[in-house]
Amino acid sequence: MGRDPEQQSVSLTTPGVIYKDLYIVGGRTSEQLPASPGDIRAYDVRTGRLRWTFHTIPRPGEYGYKTWPKKAWTYSGGANNWAGMAVDVKRGLVYVPTGSASADFYGANRVGDNLFANTLLALDATTGKRIWHFQAVKHDIWDRDFPSPPTLVAVVRERKRVDAVAQTTKHGFVFLFDRTNGKPLFPIEYRRVGPSTVEGEVAARTQPFALKPAPFARQRLTEDMLTNRTPQAHQWALEQFRTFRSDGLFVPFMVGKETVVFPGFDGGAEWGGSALDPNTGVLYVNANDIAWTSSMRRTVSAATLGRQTYLNQCAACHGENMSGASGFPSLVDITARRTHDQVTAIIRNGSGRMPGFSSLPPETLEQLVQYLTSREAKEAMRGASSPTDLKYNFTGYTRWYDPDGYPAVLPPWGTLNAIDLNSGEYVWKIPLGEYPELAEQGLKNTGSENYGGPIVTAGGLVFIGATNFDKKFRAFDKDTGKLLWETVMVNSGNATPITYEVNGKQFVVIAAFGGYGARLGVVSREPQRGAFVAFALP
């Protein structure tokens, strides 16, 4: 990749794809700098030899190079495929959705549209040559990377069958393109969006909006959409909301004022992917529909390598003062819970939702652990001096929950959607998920955050787990959205199920290991059990 391996890492969160004798793969990279570039690579399945590479951060002379600063390819990273790909075997094309450029939220060192970050790429699967592309977010400063693999579909246009590719997004759009040439099959409008007020940041002037289908998640939060679960929760939310900035999509973050991200950073479609009924052209996609907030801050000077490393790599999730955030644990008094060696192992190898930071040099890792375990006061050091040392950084991922730990917006907080891709119209839309304690109080069908996609079967069923808190697995009528069956599992099924047949009997299996069910103020002391759960159809 042309980088120092002591400062870089690539890991795999999603399998690659096979085309003939090629294994085509992306990878997960750091979302902070330094970060590896998100090259797409194809290997010979027999020998392991690298057959081709596509540079998602273009090098001199390559298409898209002028959308970055001249030397960005030497220091910028990300623009990687972590969510999976799809292969059109007949045409020999691989469709590759990419993520954000690093660092996610401050792009003063990557002025320009930043092709091929946040882009659906159609590549020749044999050579890696770009056939066409569509960039869903220019110069992303919101972490609006493509969250799921594209879905190959066939739709009817003017009484003719058109092979197409559908891509869902975190901000609630479905984009649909002709597989061969990338022509949009529904209108896309480029609208003017606002500038950034952060020093050095240059936001894109326009961004693409899908005009059809309608968004499957809400995109602008207003006062009439705040929670009314209790009068107290509503009043709290109203007072909080009036201190925020809430102007819809593509609003750059500010220093010193929270900006609403709606749907949130884990909003809209997520990594489970969508499901297609090939007989009807209906796409099934589940969505998160709650608000998050965040802002920017000037990078705090640090006296030690450990403190600086913490601010660059850890603070976005665990907070500048190590106090944690919703879904991310506090590191305060970590020595009361973990030994020095245990902390080192977790940072190096990862744990649960946290990725490993194996690219940290041993000295840097040791300094970081010393900082985490000492908590001693640090003196200021010199400010940013290289393209990877940024003047501003992100204050963290904050779900907007009320004081009781529930979303501070009106339900539905999660949905399951059936969209006819022939017409762009919704067949049905229903809340997905519940909070068991609220359901007992009569507040049912609220929907909830959900991770993991659906499948649709020839028998007319949509199976899905995904929901964070009720631990349920459900089957819906694919034509009406009617709930036909449900069961409670040992843990949340934050995964996409599979179905298969053995000796004439159909089975459905899901991984029910949870992992995404944390809520503000709720800390489970029980062991987190999990299992692969198999169901047989009669």
Image (cartoon, helix red, strand yellow):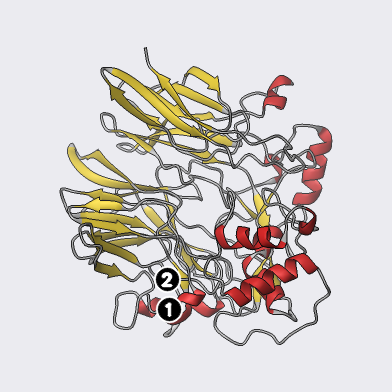
Crowd rating for badge 2 (residues with CA inside 10 Å; few <14, some 14–19, many 20+):
many
Labels 1 & 2 near each other (Cβ < 8 A): yes
352 left or right of 437 in image: left
What is the quadrant of residue 439 in the picture? top right
Q: Secondary structure at mark 1?
A: loop
Residue 409: x and y in percent read 68, 40
> Front-most of 181 and 312?
312
What is the quadrant of residue 281 in the picture? top left
**Residue placed at 67% from the left, 25% from the top?**
436
| Mark 1 or mark 2, earlier in chain | 1
55 left or right of 525 in image: left
- As measured in the structure, the alpha-carbon distance from the residue carrying label 1 to the one carrying label 2 is 9 Å
Q: Which residue is mark 2?
A: 37
Crowd rating for badge 1 (residues with CA inside 10 Å; few <14, some 14–19, many 20+):
some
441 left or right of 187 in image: right
Q: Which residue is mark 1?
A: 3
Q: Secondary structure at mark 2?
A: loop
Q: Quadrant of the C terminus?
A: top left
**Of tags 1 and 2, which is closer to the observer?**
1
Q: Is residue 318 visible to us here?
A: yes
**Residue placed at 29% from the left, 51% from the top?**
17
466 left or right of 285 in image: right
